[in-house]
Amino acid sequence: MDAQVGESSACATALLCGVKANYETVGLDSSARFENCYSSYDAHVPSLINWAQEQGE
């Protein structure tokens, strides 16, 4: 969201969670800010693994 070129953690979040993420964040939505831990508390997003576990796979 906050960079023109994706890096590995933001791209992995987009691929596995279906949500664009900010630079240098993993498993968090765009409300989380890099180097601001408090912003991550309510920014977690479910992933492909969560959905599979819910289905008992």
Image (cartoon, grey):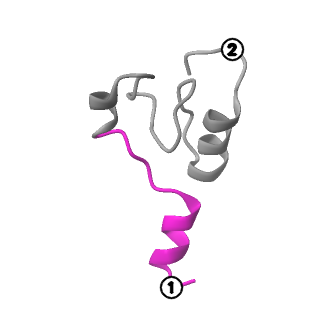
Residue 56's disc is: 1
- Residue 3 lies in quadrant: top right
Q: How many residues crowd mark 2 within 10 Å: few (<14), some (14–19), many (20+)?
A: few
Q: Position of residue 28 (x, y in %)?
A: 45, 39
Q: Position of residue 26 (x, y in %)?
A: 53, 40
- Vertical side of 38 occupied by 28: above or below: below
The amino acid on which the numbered mark 2 sits, given as a three-letter code, is Gln
Q: How many residues crowd mark 1 within 10 Å: few (<14), some (14–19), many (20+)?
A: few
Residue at 56% x, 66% y: name it: 49
Label 1 – label 2 distance at C-alpha:
37 Å
The amino acid on which the numbered mark 1 sits, given as a three-letter code, is Gly
Position of residue 50 in the picture relative to residue 11 (left or right): left
Specify start and end residues of the magenta stretch as a single range: 42-57
Q: How many marks?
A: 2
Look at the image and say whether residue 50 sits in the magenta stretch: yes
Locate the C terminus by quadrant. Answer: bottom right
Determine whether the residue tagged by mark 2 lies in a helix, strand or loop: loop
Q: Residue furthest bottom?
A: 56
Residue at 45% x, 22% y: name it: 34
Tell me which label, 1 or 2, sits earlier in the chain.
Answer: 2
Determine whether the residue tagged by mark 1 lies in a helix, strand or loop: loop
Residue at 70% x, 35% y: name it: 8
Which residue has dot 2 on it?
Answer: 4
Give whichever of 24, 6 is nearer the camera.
Answer: 24
Residue 36's disc is: none
Position of residue 6 in the picture relative to residue 28 (left or right): right
Position of residue 30 in the picture relative to residue 6 (left or right): left
- Residue 10 lies in quadrant: top right
- Vertical side of 3 occupied by 40: above or below: below
Q: Position of residue 42 (x, y in %)?
A: 28, 40
Residue at 55% x, 16% y: name it: 2
